[in-house]
Image (cartoon, helix red, strand yellow):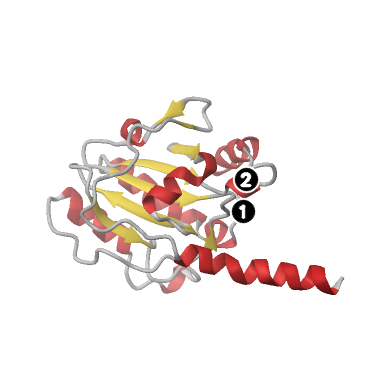
Amino acid sequence: MKKAILFSLAAFIAAPIIAQNIQSISIGTAMPMTTTKMKDVSGKDVSLKDAAEKNGLLVMFSCNTCPYVIRNQERTKQINQYALENNIGVILLNSNAAERDGADSYSAMQAYAKKQGYNWYYAVDDNSKLADAFGATHTPEVFLFNSSGQLVYKGGIDDNPSDAHNVKRQHLKEAINESKDGKPVSLKESRSIGCGIKRL
């Protein structure tokens, strides 16, 4: 029993260390893996290229289960809709490969997307391939690409993931506004706070 507890504790401690060794792509980097096809909750196979619109693409690493994702669901839906209204494509990626037989299964994703009323792509990132390519470590975590496919912002949706009522700056919304208007993004990076992506 004691060995099992120690093993579980060691695994818990090791998880953040693995995440820290993953390098996030840099601002200005071209969108990676643009043609890799992924299974969307609609049943179609889609790629980042398919999801992109005239003014760029918002890629959000998400899931069904993370308390931060659930807590941020309303503002997530608002900002995703705002991106679409400004001709920026939206795709959510579920990279929790280690939870694919449980609450982050494909069928659970379909049910979750339907319940939340998603009208954007929500796709399976098989074996966390895109999360690895992006260097994504958390849910939710966002990457905003401009019309040229270059990364202009990455990190959190805003400055207070714990309390929507005390948000002082909407980082992603500001980045969308500046990017679509062809202006330099004033805040290019922020810290993403959430659950660790469950890689195999």
Residue shown at 55% from the left, 44% from the top: 116
- How crowded is the residue under tag 2: few (<14 C-alpha within 10 Å), some, or many (20+)? many
Q: CA distance from mark 2 to mark 1?
A: 7 Å
Which residue, as the protein is rendered here, is positioned at the far front?
3
Judged from the image, the secondary structure of the residue bearing numbered disc 1 is loop
- How crowded is the residue under tag 1: few (<14 C-alpha within 10 Å), some, or many (20+)? some
Q: Position of residue 83 (x, y in %)?
A: 31, 46
Q: Position of residue 181 (x, y in %)?
A: 14, 50
Q: Is residue 72 left or right of residue 97?
A: left
Q: Nearer the viewer, residue 149 or 15?
A: 15
- Residue labelled with disc 2: 104
Q: Position of residue 42 (x, y in %)?
A: 51, 28
Q: Do we see residue 187 in this rendering? A: yes
Query: CB atoms at circles 2 and 1 under 8 Å apart?
Result: yes
Q: Position of residue 23 (x, y in %)?
A: 38, 60
The amino acid pointed to by label 1 is Thr
The amino acid pointed to by label 2 is Asp
Judged from the image, the secondary structure of the residue bearing numbered disc 2 is loop
For the N terminus, which image quadrant?
A: bottom right
- Residue labelled with disc 1: 65
Residue shown at 62% from the left, 49% from the top: 98
What's the mark number on residue 24?
Answer: none
Which of the 4 image quadrants contains residue 154?
bottom left
Q: Nearer the viewer, residue 139 or 28?
A: 28
Residue shown at 37% from the left, 65% from the top: 158
